[in-house]
Image: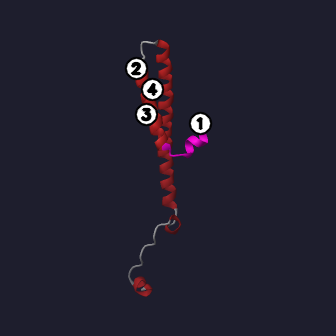
Amino acid sequence: MPLKQLLGGDSSRSATIYLAIGGLSLLKAIAVRNDRERFRRELIDAGFYLGIGLVLRQYSRLKAEKQAELQSQLPDWIAGEPAQEPSGKLRSIVN
């Protein structure tokens, strides 16, 4: 899977999927622990998937933090939030 496609989608969902696959691969490695070669292969696969899942989880968290930071710096009218109602004298003039 290309890196751009991997990071372009919902990275938190992808992280969960990779962590689940890694967990299943780890369980499979435990199940075949008597066969040395398969055990080693399954451990490598589990490490690979768990590693990618953890990296994607960190990326998702960082992406959400940066997005929240950027949205907090935007003026209300750009962010699409409704304008606050005028108060006091200004309210009576407007109405």
Q: Secondary structure at mark 1?
A: loop
Asked if the residue under mark 1 is in contact with the one under mark 4, i.e. CB atoms within 8 Å, the reply is: no
- Label whose residue precedes the other's in the sequence (4 or 1): 1
Neighbour tally class for label 4: few under 14, some 14-19, many 20 plus, Cα within 10 Å: many
Asked if the residue under mark 3 is in contact with the one under mark 4, i.e. CB atoms within 8 Å, the reply is: no
The residue pinned by badge 4 equals: 25
- Locate residue 15, reporting x and y percent: 47, 39
The residue shown at (56%, 40%) is 6
Relative height, residue 5 to residue 37 (above, below): below
Residue type beneath disc 1: Met
- Whether the magenta-drawn stretch holds residue 92 is answered as no
The residue pinned by badge 1 equals: 1
The span from disc 3 to disc 2 (Cα, nearest Å) is 15 Å
Task: Tell me if 82 is positioned left or right of 8 in this view.
Answer: left
The residue pinned by badge 3 equals: 20
In this picture, which residue range is highlighted in magenta? 2-11
Asked if the residue under mark 3 is in contact with the one under mark 1, i.e. CB atoms within 8 Å, the reply is: no
The span from disc 1 to disc 3 (Cα, nearest Å) is 18 Å
Q: Secondary structure at mark 2?
A: helix
- Label whose residue precedes the other's in the sequence (2 or 1): 1
- Label whose residue precedes the other's in the sequence (4 or 3): 3
- Locate residue 37, reporting x and y percent: 50, 14
The residue pinned by badge 2 equals: 30
